[in-house]
Amino acid sequence: MPTLHIVILAAGLGKRMHSALPKVLHRLAGKPLLGHVLDTARALSPDRICVVYGHGGEAVPRAMGDDSLTWVLQSPQLGTGHAVMQALPHLDTTGMTMVLYGDVPLTGAETLGRLFRMAESGKLALLTVDLADPSGYGRIVRNGDGSIAAIIEEKDAGPSQRAIREINTGIMAIPNAHLHGWLHRLENNNAQKEYYLTDIVAMAVEDGVAVEAIQPGHEWEVAGVNSKVQLAALERICQHEGARKLLEQGVTLADAQRIDVRGWLDCGSDVEIDVGCIFEGRVRLGDGVKVGAYSVLKDVSVEAGSAIAPFSLIESAAIGENCRIGPYARIRPGTRLDSGVHIGNFVEVKNSTIAAASKANHLSYIGDSVVGRNVNIGAGTITCNYDGANKYQTIIEDDVFVGSDTQLVAPVRVTQGSTIGAGSTITRDTPPETLTLSRVKQTSIDGWKRPVKKPRDGQ
Ligand code: UD1
Ligand code: CA
């Protein structure tokens, strides 16, 4: 394999984003634009990846946090040719350099592979596309025989050149043997007073180096992001592509237009996902898992056979096999549920482990707790884990039955097999296999009358 260097241009200003965040750090499907480009670049196993940064400053390298990248500062930004010049000290004189844009996130590795193979034979390989509306882009000027003669930027183009619909995407692969010489010959005597990388095309023609173009499989592969409108449009495309891949793997989606994956979603067989669900970070759904409508799962693993009912929010948690969660469940970080656990509506679980076949079906808060097997936690039960300053643990051992509306004031242990009467406030450990209650005795007052409204004066 010849040496492959990849230079990612990411120094430009994202003025039309109207945001303090550098453009390439805006997120598409949960990942920074530049992250998408880097992932695609890595898929080509290059010898080096240089990222040219400038606007946004050190925030960009800091956000990506990858020591294997070569970061090259371009300041001021004097054009795409000038940008690649900054990376020259890091580029070989053999093999090739592929130029990608940090704000063009969805180029397929397959498309870039074709570009690579074209440049491998010593050609200057361009990625071009025919657009219905080519305005704003550099135009591909071809000779009568169809061979490429030059790229003319729109601002430097005459009317006949502006009529050309084949445009330069900016993505290209350049033989390194020529790159150094060509870049040193660049001048900025053009409409924008910039060093245009595109001027190397005419130089290649002059030097007798073949220039050829390929086109991407889809137009969106070369779509750049300059505004929130374009970002939103690419987000839909990205989500639609992701949904299509899930369907192809056999996942059932109630509506492929109504799922958002902002990270990685890994599904076993016969997974069903209803509308409006959001998956963030890394989510793994085992065989036969069902996710109900409008649920949000972030950094979660769900084992086989479990079902999440609608409107549940689950973050940084591990859900075992055959669990029943929701509707309206909130499972917070640090939660581990064993197999067959039921967490019902309006139940919040935080930083707790719950062993097999235990249930908390209604309106509860379980925080900083260790719950054993076959435990039944009645409606309205809460662990009082916080005294305003510190947090304490609640331990509920196997086969415990906690009556409704119980407060377990931590630190406290409810010992194996014990039963708590409804409405109790438990502040001390309970003995095993006993009934514990703390409840004011019920009284009834004979002859008691409800208050009635007094008549107002004059009525
Ligand atoms: C460039 C191409 C044009 C092509 C278009 C595709 C040149 C001269 N023109 O246009 O033919 O149709 O892209 O979108 O190459 N950048 C830097 N440093 C700079 C200038 C730009 O890093 O000094 C980066 C930008 O961040 C961006 C990319 O290069 O990622 C393209 O810059 P942009 O200004 O959008 O494109 P043009 O130069 O107008
Ligand atoms: Ca420009």
Image (cartoon, grey):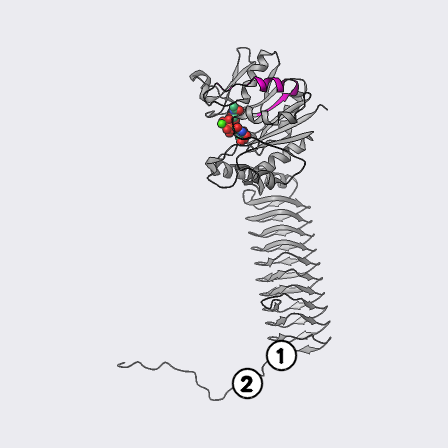
Task: Give the x, y percent position of residue 96.
Answer: 66, 23
Q: Distance between the residues labelled 2 and 1?
A: 15 Å
Q: From this viewpoint, is residue 223 visible?
A: no
Task: Say which amino acid is labelled 2.
Answer: Thr
Task: Give the x, y percent position of residue 341.
Answer: 67, 61
Q: Compared with residue 374, is residue 80 higher up or lower down, i.e. above or below?
A: above
Span highlighted in magenta in the image: 171-189
Q: How many C-alpha atoms fall within 10 Å of the one at disc 2: few (<14), some, or many (≥20)?
A: few
Q: Compared with residue 203, is residue 244 higher up or lower down, i.e. above or below?
A: below
Furthest residue toward left = 458
Query: In the image, what residue occupies the spot 71% across and 66% down?
Result: 374
Task: Say which amino acid is labelled 1.
Answer: Ser
Q: Nearer the viewer, residue 175 or 71?
A: 71
Residue corresponding to mark 2:
443
Q: Nearer the viewer, residue 31 or 424?
A: 31
Instruction: Tell whether circle 1 marks a residue whose Cβ is less than 8 angstroms from ligand 1.
Output: no
Residue corresponding to mark 1:
438
